[in-house]
Image (cartoon, helix red, strand yellow):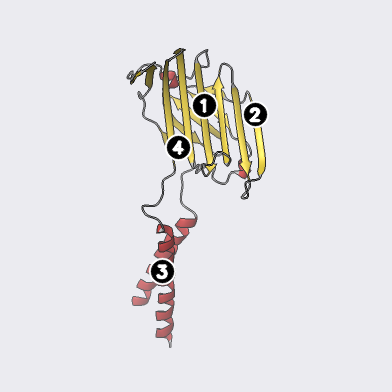
């Protein structure tokens, strides 16, 4: 009976250690944003205009499926004069010289810029793509390029979406979605879980070996 219990503990710790290496994730990466949270700026004053005001720039959520990025809004996005939708995603780290994809959609810009570098910081890809972002319903579809070089495509480090409608100089409405990956509750968490698991495995092995002898 004790042998079965020890084998059970061994299995549990092995599962914990494996989960550290291969975390279980959903098929897509998705982050929701509060709606009716626009900020209205009029020179030195600012405030929240409330719901139903410029829903076309009010971000609902962002979703990544491994091939493209979908940014969804409360109402259909608008690329008329004064509107601008921009994004930046850091795939690995948050260094502006690191690996990222960024882009803009407006009446004057429709572009996606991707940069990928190796572990030493040397550039592998620095590519611009134009006229590739397009609206579908209440969302914007943004293609991701060089996906095979982005191992964290469903686990980005930082996602920043910014929308803006400018009425006149000094008067505008904006919305932002900002996401950054969290960390374990205290430094060294993963290390100590791993060491505890290895120690338990060794102890169980020694006990079982001793009983055989």
Quarter of the figure with residue 43: top left
Q: Nearer the viewer, mark 2 or mark 3?
A: 2
Find residue 204 and report its horizontal and vertical position in percent.
Answer: 40, 75
Element at badge 2? strand
Q: Which residue in the protein does label 3 denote?
A: 10
Residue at (43% x, 37% y) in the render: 179
Disc number for residue 30: 4
The nearer-to-camera label among 1 and 3 is 1
Q: Which residue is mark 1?
A: 86
Sequence-earlier tag: 2 or 3: 3
Q: Position of residue 4 (x, y in %)?
A: 37, 73
Element type at mark 3: helix
Q: CA distance from mark 1 to mark 4?
A: 18 Å
Q: Residues within 10 Å of mark 4 (few under 14, many from 20)?
A: some
Q: Nearer the viewer, mark 1 or mark 4?
A: 1
Residue 124 location, x and y as percent?
67, 42
Q: Which element type, helix, strand or loop, lies under badge 4?
A: strand
* 4 or 2: tag closer to the N-terminus: 4
Tags 4 and 3 in contact by the CB under 8 Å rule? no
Q: CA distance from mark 1 to mark 2?
A: 15 Å
Q: Is residue 71 placed above or below 24 in the rendered structure?
A: above
Q: Which residue is mark 2?
A: 129
Which of the marked residues, 1 or 2, is nearer the chain's N terminus?
A: 1
Residue 179 appearing in the image: yes
Classed neighbour count for the residue bearing mark 1: other residues with Cα under 10 Å, few (<14), some (14–19), many (≥20): some
Q: Identify the residue at horizontal 37%, vertical 54% (top origin).
A: 186
């Amino acid at each position: 009976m004790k042998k079965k219990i020890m084998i059970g503990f061994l299995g549990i710790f092995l599962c914990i250690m494996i989960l550290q290496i291969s975390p279980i994730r959903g098929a897509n990466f998705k982050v929701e944003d509060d709606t009716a949270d626009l900020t209205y700026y009029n020179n030195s004053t600012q405030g929240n205009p409330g719901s139903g005001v410029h829903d076309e720039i009010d971000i609902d959520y962002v979703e990544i499926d491994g091939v493209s990025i979908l940014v969804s809004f409360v109402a259909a996005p608008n690329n008329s004069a004064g509107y601008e939708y921009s994004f930046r995603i850091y795939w690995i780290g948050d260094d502006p010289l690191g690996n990222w994809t960024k882009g803009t959609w407006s009446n004057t810009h429709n572009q996606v810029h991707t940069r990928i570098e190796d572990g030493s910081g040397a550039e592998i890809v620095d590519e611009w793509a134009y006229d590739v972002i397009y609206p579908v319903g209440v969302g914007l579809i943004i293609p991701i390029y060089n996906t095979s070089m982005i191992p964290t495509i469903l686990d980005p480090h930082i996602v920043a979406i910014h929308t803006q409608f400018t009425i006149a100089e000094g008067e505008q409405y904006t919305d932002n979605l900002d996401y950054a990956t969290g960390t374990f509750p205290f430094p060294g968490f993963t290390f100590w879980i791993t060491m505890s698991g290895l120690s338990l495995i060794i102890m169980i092995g020694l006990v079982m070996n001793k009983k055989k002898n």
